[in-house]
Image: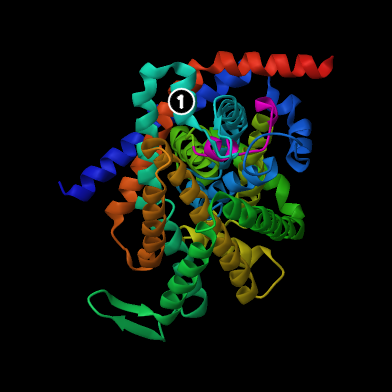
Amino acid sequence: MTFSDILTKIDSFVWGPPLMAIILAGGIMLTVRLGLLQVRRLPLALKYMLKNEEGGKGEVTSFAALCTALSATIGTGNIVGVATAIAAGGPGALFWMELAAFFGMATKYAEGLLAVHFRTVDDEGHALGGPFYYIERGMGKKWKWLAKIFAFFGVCVGILGIGTFSQVNGISSAVNNFFDPNMMHTVVIPHIGEYSVTVVIASMVLSLLVALVLIGGIKRIAGVSQLVVPLMAVIYIIITLMLVLCNLNKIPSAIVTIVKGAFSPAAVTGGAVGSIIAAAQNGIARGIFSNEAGLGSAPIAAAAAQTKEPVRQGLVSMTGTFIDTILICTMTGLSIVMTDAWSQPGLVGVGITTYAFDKGLPFPGEISAFLLMLCLVFFAFTTILGWDYYSERCLEYLCGKNGKAIKIFRWLYILAVFIGPYMTVSEVWTIADIFNGLMALPNMIALFALSGVVVKETRVYFKKNKQ
């Protein structure tokens, strides 16, 4: 057995049923204890999302903090991940993805609340918080080792691949597939290999843009995210909504196919996918991976919000899962099911979504492909920014306010972005994927342990507001 095979087995175990069961159980527990808060308080959460709080401590506005979190969650998973889940688990995977997101909204609410409740804000307004602080300060100093484990995993995920190599590869591949799919214009890089000129140009331009943003710190990351994230999300939703409206007559049958596929996959797939477990596992896994509810990454951004009310920021954080999965992933999934893109032989990943756009939109194929490429590029670019912020905050927790360590890490991160298009070592991505899953374990332990704090804070806040 090779080293790659061992890593693949570890990755399958980490992202297997036990972890998904823990995350799903946490969401169900919080949903019950909070009395379906994600349904009852969603209108209020959407109102808070658009209206920033005044007078709160923090580094960025509540909306900017949400956009920073969304910059990391809205990524290639919304386009490629959904397609992969439906191809592997059948249309029913979309049903299970939605179910995971529904309970994930309660999880994301708790994460945002605890991040603000247990964060630290110094005299200069610099905020630091997230799972490492609500583990240490909420569960007690004796659990600091668990907080450090989470922070270590967070640093590894950012620098090893989820935030760098995989995203940069996604961008360069998307650009290359559109502008030079037949590799007509290539350049030989000594000791590395032959690459399309578009890949080389894309890596240099991307590295420069990333460097210009990251050197400015959280405020610049939040500023760019606040501008780009809403814009790209709205553009993508408009495109997919147009696809759905152009195929209105197919909506009823698509919904029936999704629901039937969730509980009787073989009846929909003709036996190609015959297990409810396969549909559920693929849907839940991709849902969790896309919106990151339970992984503990989003509360790091939430802790920077200018707010006095942990509950308010929890509600704003909750809208992230709603936007990421309930809206964007649903639109992608519907597009794929309505156009039967998932059942086309030989198509994988982004090819499935490309087929759906090409068949469902009233544009020539070149325009559909260009729009999808644009969305992929923006989605991946903002994910790079978001994960740098998460990793830096994790490193800051481990090293204290060591400015030199943060600067070194930042430049290493930019270097990883630059060399990303030329990195084809699958083991690197698998290791990063493993660390990504391992982040969830310390975070979920804390959410179970501190659920009482979440419930108490919630009751006090709404009782006060009612009075």
Residue 153 appears in the figure = yes
User: Where, quadrant-wise, is the C terminus in this rendering?
Assistant: top right
Hey, which quadrant is residue 13 in on the image?
Answer: top left
As for residue 303 lying within the magenta part, the answer is yes
Q: Which residue in the structure is indicated by mark 1?
A: 444
Tell me which colouring the rendered structure shows.
rainbow
Hey, which quadrant is residue 11 in on the image?
Answer: top left
Under circle 1, the secondary element is helix
Of 261 and 33, the residue lying toward us: 33
Q: Is residue 455 left or right of residue 405?
A: right
* Picture residue at 52% right of the left edge, 38% below the top: 300
Q: Is residue 65 left or right of residue 90?
A: right
Position of 363 relative to 110 (above/below): below
Give residue 61's position: percent from left, percent from top: 68, 43
Give residue 397's position: percent from left, percent from top: 42, 36
Of 432 and 365, the residue lying toward us: 432
Position of 371 relative to 95 (above/below): below
* Picture residue at 67% right of the left edge, 25% below the top: 311
Give neighbour class at mark 1: few <14, some 14-19, many 20+ (Cα, 10 Å).
Answer: many
Position of 59 relative to 318 (above/below): below
* Picture residue at 48% right of the left edge, 65% below the top: 171
As for residue 393 lying within the magenta part, the answer is no
Of 172 and 415, the residue lying toward us: 415
Give residue 443's position: percent from left, percent from top: 45, 28
* Picture residue at 68% right of the left edge, 33% below the top: 307
Which residue, as the protein is rendered here, is positioned at the far right? 467
Q: Which residues are magenta?
A: 297-312
Which residue, as the protein is rendered here, is positioned at the far bottom? 185
Residue 87 appears in the figure = no
Q: Is residue 413 left or right of residue 101?
A: left
Name the amino acid, label 1: Met
Which residue, as the protein is rendered here, is positioned at the far front? 123
